Amino acid sequence: MEPDSVIEDKTIELMCSVPRSLWLGCANLVESMCALSCLQSMPSVRCLQNTSVMEDQNEDESPKKNTLWQISNGTSSVIVSRKRPSEGNYQKEKDLCIKYFDQWSESDQVEFVEHLISRMCHYQHGHINSYLKPMLQRDFITALPEQGLDHIAENILSYLDARSLCAAELVCKEWQRVISEGMLWKKLIERMVRTDPLWKGLSERRGWDQYLFKNRPTDGPPNSFYRSLYPKIIQDIETIESNWRCGRHNLQRIQCRSENSKGVYCLQYDDEKIISGLRDNSIKIWDKSSLECLKVLTGHTGSVLCLQYDERVIVTGSSDSTVRVWDVNTGEVLNTLIHHNEAVLHLRFSNGLMVTCSKDRSIAVWDMASATDITLRRVLVGHRAAVNVVDFDDKYIVSASGDRTIKVWSTSTCEFVRTLNGHKRGIACLQYRDRLVVSGSSDNTIRLWDIECGACLRVLEGHEELVRCIRFDNKRIVSGAYDGKIKVWDLQAALDPRAPASTLCLRTLVEHSGRVFRLQFDEFQIISSSHDDTILIWDFLNVPPSAQNETRSPSRTYTYISR
């Protein structure tokens, strides 16, 4: 047996003789570690030549042949080639091969190369891969315009977000030219306006929508204008988000000046007007800019408890048990529906269908062909107390009652589906969209439900009295209660079971001096009404500079890279 020193010398000699490409060419960590282990443990080493003789005899042989080292550990082996210098014959043979190769068709050439590659070992594949990689890379953005295909290059880059578009501008002058001439910053802004309500609303309020969606490039400013506009939009959005979280707002107040009994029970608004239903039996239409009362509609003999309008009609429900349909432009009464035996507490209409609910414990489903052609389709009975609120879409009708339950009905068949149980007292309000139902109750809590399985996803606690009104969008829940407070909740956090309850309420707004009866909100504002006979507009966009100097809270992050 050889001494350790001799074994170490042979190990070093063997390691030096093995090409470095062996380790680089190993397919994975297991192969490389296996080969290294073989060397470290000095396994059986034998030299294989075409004549199958020992290594010391090979040294005297002609250098025409290659030497192969086989390193074996009993279970696997790695074979490496140590190439000898080639002779002049190789060049002639190579030239001949190339001559034949050039004469073949493309498919034959590919087949031949595939055969060659299949006969090579792994580390040779690695060398070939390194050789091919740069050959396969193409600057397609530069190449396409050279072929008269600028529009394809522009279309590809138009899918980039702002960060990637900034990086693309820095690649080279040609990429920058494509982005500039393709007006890609303009297209990015237009894409955001089409898909995000916040961007759309901001474009209308800030006035830069006039520069968008122009058919001819000559109709608008250059690309540089839109490139500088983008970070200003992002700054606006971050400011709005911060204002919501910090409760910074500009408050406007409408005094409704009710003649008899005070209280604004319901409202709806758009960019031009606010329509409100009052306890004094009237409906008042307000100019949203000047806050002046434009029109007063009279006809109900009881308090106006609920309303909804579209571009043609206003539909109202009253404690006089009737539903009235009004022309939204003239204020003329077009129809009066007499069905319920007691006060009509809530109603919704959409796409030719209307649903009303009443203190008489019933729900009425109506086919609404026109303002004057409204027929009763079905009456839904199942609640054991007044039905306070309804909502629906193409799949479900959802109702909530003073009997502490939420009931789900099929919109198409009007058949009962399931009951959602959990509130400890009567339910005063709810909103339903997609799979989510959010409800407010006289147990002072708000509950989030999955309508498909009936599970309660979260309970929100914070109001001190009955939760009278509730609305939600993709980011927030806004609730109003008889404690006079409006609370803003983080919807995404509320849907996350890991989020601590203490982090869910973002802000509490206190300005009403009476019960909050109704509210509606969008990305920029909340509009609420109260028993104190006022309508308040909480504006989170046009906040005075003095309020903006307050400490900012964390906001939704938008990334913009300036060059």
Image (cartoon, helix red, strand yellow):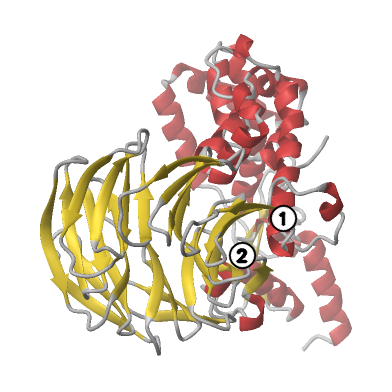
Q: Residue at x 68, y 59 (%)?
A: 244
The numbered disc on residue 249 is 1
The quadrant where residue 421 appears: bottom left
Along the viewing direction, whichever of 162 and 168 lies nearer the viewer? 162
Q: Residue at x 23, y 58 (%)?
A: 322
The quadrant where residue 182 appears: top right
Q: Residue at x 28, y 52 (%)?
A: 349
Left or right side of 220 for 441: left
Q: Nearer the viewer, mark 2 or mark 1?
A: 1
**What is the C-alpha distance between the residues marked 2 and 1?**
60 Å
Q: Amino acid at mark 2?
A: Asn
Q: Is residue 307 visible?
A: yes
Along the viewing direction, whichever of 121 and 507 lies nearer the viewer? 507
Q: Is residue 465 above or below residue 268?
A: below
Q: Is residue 313 above or below residue 383?
A: above
Q: Are marks 2 and 1 in contact (CB under 8 Å)?
A: no
The numbered disc on residue 28 is 2
Q: Amino acid at mark 1?
A: His
Q: Earlier in the sequence, mark 2 or mark 1?
A: 2
Q: Position of residue 45 (x, y in %)?
A: 68, 72
Left or right side of 431 for 36: right
